[in-house]
Image (cartoon, rainbow, N blue to C red):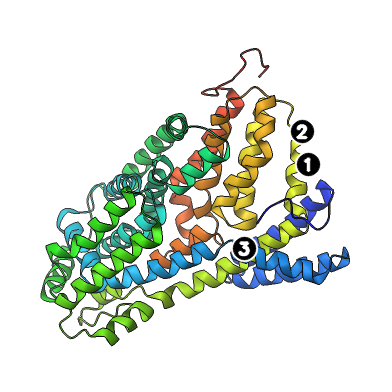
Amino acid sequence: MQHDQAAITLRPLEAFLVIVILLGGISFSIVYYGVEPHTPIIFSIFLLLIYGLCKKVPFKELESGLIEGAKSGLGAIFLFFFIGMLISSWMASGTIPTFIYLALEIVNGKYFFAVVFIVTSIIGMSIGSSLTTTATLGVVFISVSSALGLSTAITAGAVISGAFFGDKMSPLSDTTNLASMTVKVDLFEHIKNMLWTAVPAFTISLILFILLSPSKTATNFDNIHLLRNALMELQLVQWYSLIPFVLLAILAIKKVPAILALSSGILSAIIISFFIQKDYGLGQVMSLLYSGYKSNSGVEELDSLLTRGGMESMLFSISLVLLALAMGGLLFKLGILPALLQGMQQFLTRIPLLISATALSSIGVNYLVGEQYLSILLPGNAFQDSYTKAGLHPKNLSRVLEDAGTVVNPLVPWSVCGVFITSVLGVPTTEYLPFAFFCILSPILTIFFGLTGWTITKLDKRVEY
């Protein structure tokens, strides 16, 4: 989906008014009425179609915009299906239950949120995938926090903060590679430059999670012992159940494509499940991969923790992603997004304004289109010449794209990451958003450094700041 495929050219002011109406309607519907985002997005698409017809854009062109927008999300949709199968197969193989058991063994509630943040940061950086980290360890920590009687919203915030810190700082991450490639900066130079904003954001987030963590838990530990014993009785806790996770991590480190790596994790888990689930046959496995794992231990708390996954659990997410990206395709086709970017470039005469506008553009694309990659690609291509004219090293641009693009996507309820995380963790975006400290702090810090000039690298020292 390219932003130069617009069917008409709009004035920036008109494009801005259209965006304000659409975003205002979507946000009001979700926050005030508490409806699912599907309906307001469908209504927004309907309004855009009417707007396009009033502008005398042929309906075939509008339909093309919808299709092109939806097509851009097919990769993510396939990933969603595989993640759904991964979770259900890892439940049946004992992979996630074993992680839950180990976590229950060592976690007593003290500094819990800080521990979650650190562990997910390390794993996220190791495998370079925020969504995989969230779908695996994130599910484990949400389960443990429920068992300990702690806030699942704060736990989700810690998981997301750690996972996206790891994703952002990993040389294995697709978004990190995309940002460096978009502006033609060496990958490791890009990662090194991101430390200026990532380290302060990480440190502040860690302090906040330490302060939020209970000094001692008020949880009834008899209940924790009950859960551990139930897991052992179900024979779901085995050392070899961790093989699928180790295999997935190794393949990710070796930069094997995500779908192939996930497939290996699923297949290895299926094989192991035949040894753990004595009554499993091929039919049960196929049902498991579609409908998810169903726990019937008789322990209500444990059954609620383990009954998860399956392709069916991803259908809500997939439908929303398709609608959001289709709306984004219409925004391109009607020239609304290109007009907004062009309008901003007219006022970028000074470096602080340039950096702030870049960050706001990446945030805006996340909220308008809900797509992480486009929040990097569109502003990256739009502002590249402006950074060169301003005498700024391109690594400044790549850093802003990550700080305001990559890590903001999970904060948008209708975005690819936001929908996926809510579906996997079972915590609404609006609930975990205030506690996703790293994701909130990163764009704030990048704008602050842009305004002050700290850590900004110039190609020509004579350029006025």
> Would you say the residues marked 2 and 1 are in contact, meaning their CB atoms lie under 8 Å apart?
yes
Could you tell me if residue 430 is visible in this image?
no
Q: Earlier in the sequence, mark 1 or mark 3?
A: 3
Disc 3 packing (10 Å; few <14; some 14–19; many ≥20): many
For the N terminus, which image quadrant? bottom right
Q: Are marks 1 and 3 in contact (CB under 8 Å)?
A: no
How many numbered discs sit on the rendered protein? 3
* Image quarter hosting the C terminus: top right
Relative to residue 352, is residue 342 depicted above or below? below
How many residues crowd around disc 2 within 10 Å: few (fewer than 14), some, or many (20 or more)? few
Q: Which mark is residue 347?
A: 2
* Residue found at x 38% / y 44%: 166
In the rendered structure, find residue 325 and report the number of the disc placed on it.
3
**Res 343 label:** 1
Could you tell me how far apart the alpha carbons at marks 3 and 2 are, in whole angstroms? 29 Å
Residue kind at label 2, given as amino acid type = Phe
Gap in angstroms between the C-alphas marked 1 and 3: 23 Å
Looking at the picture, tell me which residue is in the foreground, 213 or 294: 294
Disc 3, SS: helix
Q: Pinpoint residue 99: horizontal percent, then vertical percent.
A: 21, 61
Comparing marks 3 and 2, which lies closer to the viewer? 3
